[in-house]
């Protein structure tokens, strides 16, 4: 539904009403205490004004009850606001496991979008209504900020790392997309549109633009072109660690630390392989910094995410397909 307030953007996601409710509560609270304090000042200024030059007001030592009141009440109000805000914050930054993943790369001055099926967009994002969508974002140059006012959600897009954002659209339509972080001379022109479509229309839209295959298929070809399979062998006999089923697991490093093999870990291992050495392996992998683009990194990461451990089938049966990241 649209926004009930004329100065507000449309409410087009499940977060919109929550953010608006918190914002309006803060506005109402601010107005209430502003009027209360201003009114109290005016009341006491009139009531206790000096009526003659010789008048001397009595000395007041203070009131313990009053001190406790104006200390405890603001504290409770602040904790209530903190709890409410934290609840909204954590809901916005914990994507559901079944969310549809979309990759976004920001650069001066455009948004480059890649869907898992291989569809690519510039300054446009097509998503289905009613389905959770998770954006995995990075920047090629400076700090950007992905902001859709109608969804009441935004997130900084940083170079050399991945940040995530998710939303669930509640209505179809076309909604504005902005960069909310000053990123250079053409910052104001770094705009785009989010197209929220009915599921059937979205599936029809997905059928186009897949000439090169899915991201994981493109990543598999790039993995072979870069000769990565010479060291990262499926049988575990290569000079590098096996990658089948590694995504989402805990990896033991040679210094005894443990890290989660998420998108950021995979990206760092490709560009700066010496940063985190897997236990039992040597620091011999060359860096691919400058040899692969951000889009190439996305393809490689998606390929590694897509390959699960091989499952041995009983004699006479067909082995099941490797588990996808959402199945593991």
Image (spheres, helix red, strand yellow):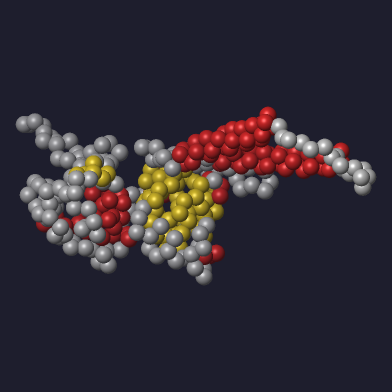
| Direction from residue 276 to residue 185 in the image, left or right | right
Residue at 26% x, 52% y: name it.
266
Q: Residue furthest bottom?
A: 185
Residue at 17% x, 40% y: name it.
309
| 307 shown above or below 73 | below
Residue at 8% x, 31% y: name it.
314
Whole-percent x, y for residue 232 in the image: 14, 52
Whole-percent x, y for residue 23 in the image: 61, 42
| Direction from residue 315 to residue 328 in the image, left or right | right
Residue at 36% x, 37% y: name it.
97
Whole-percent x, y for residue 326 in the image: 30, 38
Q: Is residue 193 visible?
A: no
Q: Is residue 86 visible?
A: yes
Q: Quadrant of the C terminus?
A: top left
Nearer to us in this view, 74 or 95: 74
| Direction from residue 69 to residue 106 in the image, left or right | left
Whole-percent x, y for residue 280 in the image: 11, 48
């Amino acid at each position: 539904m649209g926004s009930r307030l004329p100065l507000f953007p449309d409410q087009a996601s499940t977060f919109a009403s929550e953010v608006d409710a918190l914002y309006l509560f803060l506005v109402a609270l601010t107005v209430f205490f502003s009027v209360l304090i201003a009114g109290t000042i005016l009341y006491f200024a009139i009531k206790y004004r000096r009526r003659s030059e010789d008048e001397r007001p009595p000395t007041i030592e203070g009131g313990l009850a009053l001190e406790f009141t104006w200390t405890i009440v603001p504290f409770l109000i602040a904790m209530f606001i903190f709890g409410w805000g934290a609840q909204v914050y954590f809901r916005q930054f914990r994507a559901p496991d079944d969310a549809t993943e979309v990759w976004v790369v920001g650069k001066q001055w455009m948004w480059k979008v890649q869907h898992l099926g291989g569809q690519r967009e510039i300054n446009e994002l097509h998503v289905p209504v009613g389905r959770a969508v998770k954006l995995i974002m990075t920047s090629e140059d400076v700090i950007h900020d992905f902001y859709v006012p109608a969804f009441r959600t935004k997130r900084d897009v940083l170079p050399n790392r991945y940040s995530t954002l998710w939303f669930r659209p509640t209505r179809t339509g076309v909604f504005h997309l902005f960069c909310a972080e000053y990123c250079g001379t053409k910052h104001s022109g770094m705009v785009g549109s989010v197209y929220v479509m009915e599921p059937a229309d979205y599936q029809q839209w997905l059928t186009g633009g897949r000439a090169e295959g899915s991201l994981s298929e493109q990543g598999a070809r790039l993995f072979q072109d870069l000769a990565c399979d010479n060291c990262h062998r499926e049988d575990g006999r290569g000079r590098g660690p096996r990658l089948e089923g590694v995504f989402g697991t805990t990896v033991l490093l040679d210094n005894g630390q443990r890290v989660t093999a998420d998108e950021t870990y995979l990206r760092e291992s490709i560009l700066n392989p010496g940063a985190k050495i897997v236990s039992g392996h040597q620091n011999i992998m060359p860096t691919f910094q400058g040899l692969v683009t951000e889009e190439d990194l996305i393809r490689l990461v998606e390929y590694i995410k897509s390959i699960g451990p091989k499952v041995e089938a009983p004699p006479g049966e067909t082995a099941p397909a490797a588990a996808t990241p959402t199945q593991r």
